[in-house]
Image: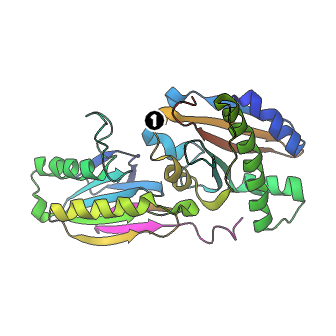
């Protein structure tokens, strides 16, 4: 699964150009995990999913709070409520997870569907470290996402953890 | 006062009253401060126990059962005995509402290790479902905990 595989999925869903770039795994140290999506204290929306066969393959999508709001307004219009913003973020996570897990399922010659997305609004570092603390940094892939909305760029960070044997 | 962030799995000891050891964006991890007059140590604990299969290397502060003995040893090398130490702990949240919380296990393991060394926990802010940032003021020996105000409504 590469950034190039996921970008068209998101572009189709949102109707805007999407750029994704993967950070080399070798550059990610344990101490730096809370900073993968920006300053660790920054208010953010986190969306977490994993494969229904267990937490082996996991996905965490992190939007800075202002970018989550911009995404909500892109899809729902100005003045969108907080609950709807979370719905939009969860839907984006669901679509990305579906594509990601489908590719892994093809490799396994099986079927793998995502769990219902869990979401929260909290400090970016708290969200990331809670999901990734138990995983060695070598098993984590970090992709930065830039959505080119009409009036601004919307940023997010996608973190993928593949189960041993799926890498 | 200079803030000194301590990353996941790291240990640090400071004898400077001008340094404020801190952790920004703490989730299920636990910040373990050991302090006495004129000295503060911090371990940023990530998991409760070191797996038997893992090697000797790695971050000294990552596992509670390795981090706390190492932090006590570092402090004792500076001439402060464990009998003089008090502990302040924070973190161990279930962010994203994980049903089986690593945070709870971290807090239990930290308390067990501190009890083994006879170090009393005098300041504590653990559990819940919210992330925290924590700072320790070496002058007042006070633990300062920050959380996001009304996180969902603020969207």
Residue B37 visible (yes or no): no
**Host chain of mark 1:** A
Region rendered in magenta:
B134-155
Classify A110 as above or below A83: above
Q: Nearer the viewer, residue B15 or A42?
A: A42
Classify A67 as above or below A137: below
Q: Is residue A150 left or right of residue B140?
A: right
Report the residue at 31% width, 50% height from top. Answer: B49
- For disc 1, the marked residue is A29
Q: Nearer the viewer, residue A107 or B118?
A: A107
Q: Position of residue A105 (x, y in %)?
A: 68, 35
Quadrant location, the N terminus of chain A: top right
Q: Is residue B148 magenta?
A: yes
Q: Position of residue B114 (x, y in %)?
A: 22, 62
Colour style of the rendered protein structure: rainbow
Report the residue at 55% width, 48% height from top. Answer: A55
Q: Nearer the viewer, residue B83 or B30?
A: B30
């Amino acid at each position: 699964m590469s950034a190039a595989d996921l970008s068209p999925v998101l572009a189709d869903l949102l109707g805007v150009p999407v750029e994704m770039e993967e950070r080399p795994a070798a550059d990610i140290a344990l101490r730096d995990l809370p900073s993968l999506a920006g300053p660790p204290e920054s208010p953010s929306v986190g969306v977490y999913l994993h494969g229904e066969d267990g937490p082996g393959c996991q996905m965490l999508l992190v939007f800075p709070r202002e970018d989550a709001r911009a995404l909500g307004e892109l899809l729902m219009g100005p003045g969108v409520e907080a609950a709807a913003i979370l719905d939009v973020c969860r839907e984006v996570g669901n679509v990305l997870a579906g594509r990601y897990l489908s590719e892994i399922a093809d490799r396994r010659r099986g079927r793998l569907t995502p769990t219902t997305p869990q979401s929260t609004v909290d400090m970016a570092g708290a969200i990331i470290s809670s999901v990734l603390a138990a995983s060695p940094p070598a098993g984590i892939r970090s992709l930065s996402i830039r959505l080119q909305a009409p009036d601004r760029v919307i940023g997010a960070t996608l973190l993928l953890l593949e189960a041993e044997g799926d890498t | 006062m200079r803030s000194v962030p301590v990353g996941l799995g790291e240990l640090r000891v400071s004898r400077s009253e001008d340094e404020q050891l801190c952790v920004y964006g703490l989730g299920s991890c636990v910040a373990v401060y050991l302090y006495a007059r004129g000295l503060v140590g911090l371990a940023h604990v990530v998991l409760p126990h070191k797996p038997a299969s893992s090697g000797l290397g790695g971050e000294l502060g990552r596992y509670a059962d390795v981090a706390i003995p190492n932090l006590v040893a570092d402090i004792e090398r500076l001439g402060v005995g464990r009998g003089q130490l008090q502990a302040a702990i924070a973190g161990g949240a279930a962010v994203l509402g994980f049903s089986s919380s690593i945070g709870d296990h971290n807090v239990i393991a930290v308390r067990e290790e501190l009890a083994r060394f006879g170090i009393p926990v005098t300041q504590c802010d653990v559990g819940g479902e919210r992330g925290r940032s924590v700072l320790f003021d070496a002058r007042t020996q006070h633990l300062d905990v920050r959380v996001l105000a009304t996180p969902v409504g603020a969207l």
